[in-house]
């Protein structure tokens, strides 16, 4: 959805004439998420860690045609 005050455009699923300009500010990693699995009375234990990567983006302009 794009609005410029008076006109509102809806996309299904997107607007063909819309253009978005953005700047990449940086990349990083989120906090660690631990996944622990254990089976009862089997002596089976597994610990896995994961850090999701992300990109920080700043939207500078949205143009509709």
Image: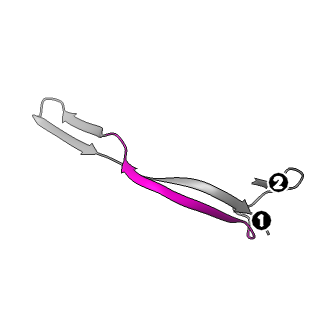
What residue span does the magenta drawing correspond to? 16-31
Q: Residue at x 24, y 36 (%)?
A: 36
User: Please, which residue is most extreme toward the left here?
Assistant: 43
22 left or right of 32 in image: right
Q: Is residue 33 above or below residue 13?
A: above
Location of residue 2 in the rendering, given as x and y in whole percent from the top left corner: 76, 55
Label placed on residue 64: 1
Cβ atoms at labels 2 and 1 below 8 Å apart: yes
User: Please, which residue is most extreme toward the right here?
Assistant: 6
**SS state under label 2:** loop
Q: Residue at x 40, y 54 (%)?
A: 27
8 left or right of 30 in image: right
Q: Quadrant of the C terminus?
A: bottom right
Label placed on residue 2: none
Label placed on residue 4: 2
State yes or no: residue 40 in magenta: no
Q: Is residue 32 visible?
A: yes
Q: Is residue 11 above or below residue 47?
A: below
């Amino acid at each position: 959805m794009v609005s410029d005050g008076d006109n509102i455009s809806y996309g299904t699923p997107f607007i063909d004439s819309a253009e978005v300009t953005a700047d990449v500010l940086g990349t990083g990693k989120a906090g660690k998420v631990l996944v622990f699995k254990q089976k009862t009375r089997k002596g089976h234990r597994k610990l896995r860690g994961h850090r999701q990567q992300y990109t920080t983006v700043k939207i500078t302009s949205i143009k509709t045609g």
